[in-house]
Image (cartoon, helix red, strand yellow):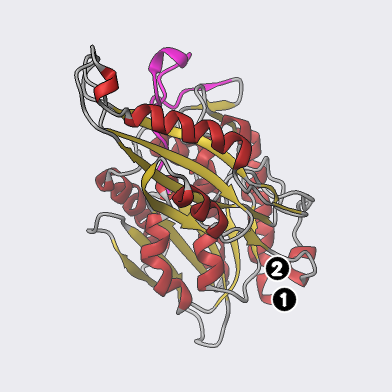
Amino acid sequence: MDTTGLLTELVTTSTVSGDPAPQRLTMNTVLSLLRARTPKLTVEGDTDGPHPWMLITNDASPETTRLMFACHVDTVPPGDLKHWQFDPFVADIEDGVLRGRGTSDMKAGLVAATAAVLNAIDDGVPVAFLLTSDEEIGSLGAQAARHAVADCSVGAVVVPEATGNRVHLGHRGALWVDVFTAGVAAHGSTPQRGESAIFKLVDVLARAKEELPLASDAFLGAETFNVGLIDGGSAPNIVPDAAHVVIDHRTVGDGRDLLAWWRDQPEVDRVDARIDLPGVRTTPDNNWISALPNPVAAEPVTYFTDASILAAAAPSAPIVVWGPGTPALMHAADESVSLAELDAAVAAYGAVTRAWPTVD
């Protein structure tokens, strides 16, 4: 398989979260490549909906457990192009590095997984290949596919996110919270006649920095608080009667204490949970994990993945986050991936698929 050619094709297709058409096209590109090798594939999914997904399996006896590779096809937007040294969707190669949006997160992982699934099909290894959309905005494609994963007899899961090819056993959850404040409009020259929703929001955010009940966990680490989006007001000369912020919490618990804190603040008018994904922990005391060819990291990855959904859909399956790419380049300008790292992932995944029938 021409891994560099496939990665180039995938990166030149902009698959920013929220736009289903190019994500659907990418899924069909991968499916066509697999079907060119063998038509004996079962495909389940919804590629016409707002959050496309596809689950591809080969022939296997019903009692056989499958090795699953789970990949999202979407990327974050490139942001302000003035911060890039190159076009994020040209996918050029320089000094053995392929450059562009999505290379590390996670189209290199998608390519490596595709190669592994092709080899597994050739060798008769029972595999499942889950392709999801809109992971970057809350694992929406994985949520739509959850029932299919639950029915799939999954024995283990590889999520090929960028880890520098180190195996990681979990990550914190994600709680994105919309916080609204309400005020009373008035002329900007007489602010005493109104009540500023923005001032209320500023007050509660300042208090949050000191008082939020952020928990910690021995493995997952500390919970965090980030102001990701903020808006309010309609004109400079009007006292704003509404303001809004989106908070990104990375959680180690169920998030109830954090939600309760926001809802208890006197300035807050309304609080909505935009996404609420649990953390993921896989015990290292597992024969399959012990047999993996790459080292297992002691720490979790810092970001969330579709594993939050997959762990609930396949609760008995060990899940690892493990793939080519540099975590520091995820969501950053000048994103890239080493082609040598991609080749190493292809080789490692191939070893895992070949060993799959012999692992308890």
Callout 2, which amino acid? Ala
On screen, 268 above or below 125?
Answer: above
What is the crowding at mark 2: few (fewer than 14 residues within 10 Å), some, or many (at least 20)? Answer: some
Q: Position of residue 42 (x, y in %)?
A: 37, 72
Which is more toward the observer, 248 or 360?
A: 248
Q: Which residue is mark 2?
A: 355
Main SS of the magenta part reads loop
Would residue 145 be visible to someone looking at this image? Answer: yes
Image position of 91 (left or right of 261): left
Residue placed at 44% from the left, 27% from the top? Answer: 91
**Which residues are drawn in magenta?**
73-94
Which is more toward the observer, 84 or 87?
A: 84
Magenta-colored stretch includes residue 92: yes
Image position of 274 (left or right of 303): left
Callout 1, which amino acid? Thr
Look at the numbered disc 1 and give the secondary structure of its residue.
helix
Residue placed at 68% from the left, 40% from the top? Answer: 164
Residue placed at 77% from the left, 53% from the top? Answer: 296
Q: Position of residue 221 (x, y in %)?
A: 72, 48
What is the crowding at mark 1: few (fewer than 14 residues within 10 Å), some, or many (at least 20)? Answer: few
Q: Which residue is mark 1?
A: 358
Q: Position of residue 172 (x, y in %)?
A: 62, 52
